[in-house]
Structures are given as C-alpha cells and as structure tokens.
Image (spheres, helix red, strand yellow):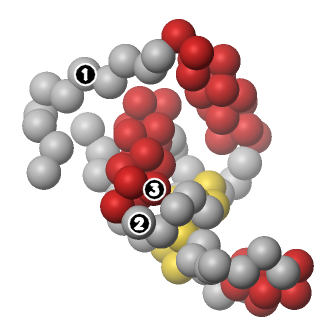
Amino acid sequence: MIPENLQLTPKPTGKKQLDIIKKFETQASVIINAADSGVEGEVIINFIAIYLRFKKPIYRLWTSSLQPNVFRRLLKNLSLRAIITL
C-alpha cells in the first residue's frame, strides 16, 4: 500500500540518472521494465515511474538469462502490467 501523500525525493547523486531516464521515456513508445524480479526491483521501477510521471505503457520482461536469443524471444512476448499511479 502506498500512502496518498507519499513524497518522493531523489538523492542528489541519482538526479542526473533520473533526468536521463525521463529523456528516454519521452522518446519511447513503451517502457520495458527489466529490473530485478524481486520485490526490491518492482518497488524501484514503481517509484521511478511515479516520480517521473510515466505516461507510456509499462511492459515487464522476466528472465534470468543474458543470452541474446532469449531476449529476442522474450521481447516478442512481453506482458503489460498495471502500475500504481498517484
């Protein structure tokens, strides 16, 4: 559960990276979440999407493989996932 009045403030060391992510988000037609599949990875991408106010659909890529052929196959079968918005 995310509180209604959640205030997200990036660390100064992460602000530049968030600016880069936002730039790519504005140029993209969709977002592909390939973050860690654990709870921590989900929380990180959710907080980034909320903080930057992503407008694009977010798809989830689940894999433990780093093989290019696996990535190509998975990119054809992405699943759209809901994201919490504030």
Q: Amino acid at mark 3?
A: Gly
- Residue tagged by mark 3? 41
Which mark is nearer the camera, 3 or 1?
3
Q: Is residue 72 visible?
A: no
For the residues bearing labels 2 and 3, Cβ distance under 8 angstroms: yes
Residue furthest to the right in view is: 68
Other-residue count near label 1 (Cα within 10 Å), few / some / many at <14 / 14–19 / ≥20: few
From the image, tell me which residue sits under label 2. 38
Task: Tell me residue 16's x, y (percent).
Answer: 66, 18
The kind of residue on which mark 2 rests is: Gly
Which residue is at a point 45% across and 56% down the rendered structure image?
41
* Residue located at (72% from left, 48% from top): 28
Residue 57's disc is none
Above/below status of 47 relative to 41: above
Residue depicted at x 66% and y 26%: 17
Taking the image as shown, residue 51 lies to the left or right of residue 56, namely left
Residue 74 is situated, as x and y percent measured from the top left of the image, at 70, 84
Q: Position of residue 70 (x, y in %)?
A: 79, 86
User: Quick one: 86 or 63, which is closer to the camera?
Assistant: 63
Q: Amino acid at mark 1?
A: Gln
